[in-house]
Amino acid sequence: MIELNIDPASEMTELGPNTVRLTFLPGGRCVEFEAGKLPYQEHGKPQSILDVAMNFGVHLEHACGGSYACSTCHVVVKKGRELLNECSEEEADRLDMAADLQLHSRLGCLTVIEKPGEVVVEIPAWNRNYISEGGGSTL
Ligand code: FES
């Protein structure tokens, strides 16, 4: 697994056949790994956006510890929706409680990257501000 510090708008190298590239906006932190090979971090579903974030030390809020009970892991999928699992009814119900809900909003703990390829997610401003205003999990 590798981490790239590159501008997401710049031209990227071609991905290997089993490689996932995940970019977190707005910071542009970009990580790559071989699909199915990341060690599970015990929060959210294996190879979920939250699991990948934790593997690479990217801070994605997860107040309930990844048990889909809080919606603080809210992300907006900007690219690669076809590579992800479908949003379940359970996830949609929980998402209704998320601040700044958007058309392609998902819960990071339940959104699993099922196929290799390129995924881009944005961490909404509310989630980012939650930490600076004294919120934030200690998990
Ligand atoms: Fe609480 Fe995802 S971490 S719903």
Image (cartoon, rainbow, N blue to C red):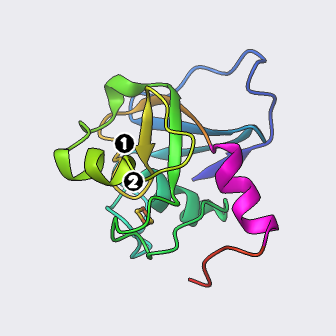
Rendered location of residue 98, percent (x, y): 48, 50
Q: Position of residue 119 (x, y in %)?
A: 50, 31
Taking the view exactly as shown, the residue that stands out farthest to the top is 11
x%, y% of residue 66?
40, 69
User: Residue 42, located in which quarter of the rendered image?
Assistant: bottom left
Whether the residues at callouts 1 and 2 have beta carbons within 8 Å, the answer is: yes
* Along the viewing direction, whichever of 21 and 103 lies nearer the viewer: 103
* Vertical placement of residue 92 versus 50, above or below: above
The quadrant of the picture showing ligand 1 is bottom left
Magenta highlight range: 123-133
Q: CA distance from mark 1 to mark 2?
A: 6 Å
Tell me, for residue 16, which label it has, or none. none
The amino acid at mark 2 is Ser
Measuring from the top left, give residue 9's x and y in whole percent: 76, 19
103 lies above or below 100: above
Q: Residue at x 58, y 20 (%)?
A: 14
Magenta residue check for 132 = yes
Q: Nearer the viewer, residue 93 or 6?
A: 93
Q: Give the class, few, some or many, for how many residues have Cα within 10 Å of label 2's Cα (few <14, many ≥20).
A: many
Give the residue at mark 2: 48
Q: Residue at x 72, y 54 (%)?
A: 128
